[in-house]
Every structure is written in C-alpha cells, then in structure tokens.
Amino acid sequence: CSVSVGSAGRAPTSCGEPASVVVQALLAPPLAQFLFEPSWLACALVNQACCVHFHSRNSLRTLASGLPSNNLDDPLRCRMWRRLCLGSMVFGDGMGTHTYTMLTEREAAADAEIRRDIGRTFPECLGEESTEALFRVLRAISHRLEDIGYCQGMNFIAGVLLQVFQAQQGAESRTSSTPIENAAGHQPAASEGPVKAQTAAKSEALVYQCVVSILSRHGMNQYFGHRFPKLRLTALQFDCLVEAFLPDLGQAFDVFNISADFYATQWFLTLFSCSLPIAHVVRVWDHFLCRGMKFVHRVGLALLNEARPILLSLGFDDLAMRLRDLGQHTALSPDELICAALEFKVTNRLLSELEHAMAIGTSPSEGARTH
C-alpha cells in the first residue's frame, strides 16, 4: 500500500496557489478494511508517520490554503473543520448524539433569548428547519456551558457551522441516488425518512461539539463570561496593533477617541460571521481554526488597511458609521483578504507580550513596534 504525498510539507509558493499535498490522503476513511492481515502492521506504521506529518502546523496551514472558497459543501472543508475542532475524537451514541439529544429536550433559562436571536441569525440562509436546529444547538450549549450559559454571538458561530455541515449533508443526500434510479422514477423507501432524521441529528450534534470546542480551545468562553473579561483585553491588544502597524490610522482614531471597543468587538465575538459575506467567513475560518485568534487580529488589520484612504478622509460621524459595517464594504475577494491578512505578522508571542505589558502597566505599543 503506497500513497504519493508529493511535497506535502512545502508551503505554497504564492498565496493563491493550491496546496500540492494530496489532501484526500489526510481525510480519507480508513483503508485497513481493504487490506490483508499481513499488511496491517506496515500500513499502521506508515499511517502513524503520515499522521504526525499531516497534523503538523505547517501541513494544516498548507491544507487550509488549498481549500476552495466558492462553495460551502466541500467535503474536504467539513472534514478538516471537524478534525481541527475535535481532533481524532469520535463521538458514539454514548457521548455524542444521545447526550446532545438529552440536552436539547431540557428547557433552558435562556430559551426566550435564544428564540429571539435565532430569528435574526442568517435569515436569508437558514430555513425553518435549520432555524429550529440552531435553537436546539444553542439550548444544548447553554446547558453544557453552565458557567456562562447562552450569550449573543454564539448564535452566529453556531450558524456558520450549521450552514457548512448541513450543506455537506445535502450534497451527500443528492449523490446518494444514482442517475439510473432517478431516471427509473425511484421512490424513496419507507426507511429513508428515519435514516435522514438520524443523519440530521448527528449533524446537529457535530455542530454542538464543534462550537463547544471552539469556545474552549481558543479561550472564547472568557469573551462571554461575567463582564466579558477577555474581550476588553483583546480590544486593547487590537488598539496597540493598529497603532503599531497602521500608525496614521491609529492617530486619527486617537483624535476622535475611537477604540476597538467601539467597532471590533463583534469581530472577535462572532469571528467575523456577522461582519463579512459568508464566502469570506468560511475562508477566514479555514485559517482561524489552524492558526488561532491571532488570525482574527490579522483580518481586522487587513480590513482597516484596505479602507485606510477612505477612513482618513472622513469626519467623526461618517467614520463611526463606516467602521460599524467595514467588512460589508470590502472589495477584496475571499482569497485576496486572506493574502492581505497574512502580510501582518501578528504572532502569539506578540499578543502575549502585549497582555503582559498591560498587566504591569507599561506602554504596550512599544512592544508591538519592535516586532
């Protein structure tokens, strides 16, 4: 058994170049069932080496760069998102769908608030069934995260995941019937209804698991905690980054006393899901899931840099209005936005140093300029 992986560890030569790695090798279902027993050990050793290589940081970033931006139902994106959110965890009925169903059947204190918010969460994309699915996902999250419950912003994060995984589910359903069956007037079997419902329930449970993982792994649960402790820190970090990377814009914001608290909090609370077109959102998430919160800072800087000539020419009222819906005015394509974001070298080390400088009361912008 041999797999040609090409130059899997090599980064793309340009920002828009598709990854040369054979991504199916990373995301394909297990092959052991097709092998004779003597080949299992050899395959296991190769698989272990490939797994370590493919799950390295550089390989995941290369893979993300090669994903398409023009469709939500790409199977590679769905599998990569699941792998990045949940790792190698496989949820069976005991701790996956069954547990999720139990949580959705219990009334929650936030039910009324959730019901109010889901009506304005991607209304042009989510139909009635999807909206009810979103309600169940958010109710389960409110039970799972007992310390913070449900907060606004979670609805958009869950809504993006729901769209992507449901789009993939719909694509699989369309390809499940062969052209011969359709031409012959094939009628769905009576058992297809329950199977479809079970598949939808698993998809919902997957969205629930991924939302909980994103909030926990990237520290976003602290964004929604009492008095939003981390959100304020993140806004201060972004102010320092604007001052360091876009000094003329930072100076203009200082004149009008405008801080990131005013215009950027939704970027971090929702990961741009309500601030950018959905095609841009999924590309941002492709990189966010394998790079972390620093990439959200980079995208914010890229949007400000694109609009900088216009922003510098506006007065306070127009500037405030433009900043509120900055992402909706972008002329960059999804891939162009990613390329522009990667130009800003915001690192985890830089963000940590800014946080430390704020904690000890020194000037954090000086540390940002040194990078």
Image (cartoon, helix red, strand yellow):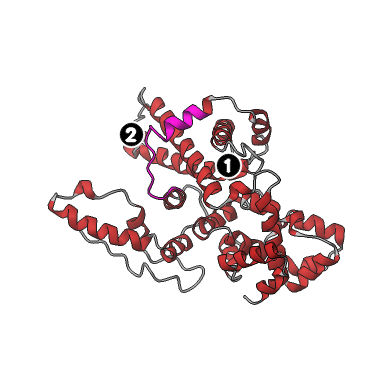
Q: Residue 24 location, x and y as percent?
A: 35, 56
State the CA–CA distance, disc 1 to disc 2: 34 Å
Residue appearing at x 31%, y 61% in the figure:
50
Residue span colored magenta: 86-103
Task: Farthest residue to the bottom: give it.
Answer: 370
Where residue 57 sits, quadrant-wise, is bottom left
Residue 275 visible within the image: no
Secondary structure found at label 1 = helix
Q: Is residue 340 above or below residue 268?
A: below
Residue 157 visible within the image: yes
The crowd level at tag 1 (other Cα within 10 Å; few <14, some 14-19, many 20+) is many
Q: Would you say 64 lies left or right of 221 here?
A: left
Q: Residue 260 location, x and y as percent?
A: 74, 58
Q: Is residue 359 above or below residue 157?
A: below
Secondary structure found at label 2 = helix
| Residue ID for mark 1 | 159
Q: Would you say 231 lies left or right of 80 here?
A: right
Could you tell me the amino acid type at mark 2? Glu
Closer to the camera, 20 or 56? 56
Q: Is residue 101 magenta?
A: yes
Task: Farthest residue to the left: give it.
Answer: 38
Could you tell me the amino acid type at mark 1? Gly
Where residue 333 sits, quadrant-wise, is bottom right
The mark lying in front, picked from 1 and 2, is: 1
Q: Residue 247 location, x and y as percent?
A: 74, 73
Q: Residue 183 location, x and y as percent?
A: 35, 34
- Which comes sooner in the sequence, label 1 or label 2? 1
Q: Is residue 334 magenta?
A: no
Residue appearing at x 53%, y 41% in the figure:
162
| Residue ID for mark 2 | 181
Task: Farthest residue to the front: give it.
Answer: 360
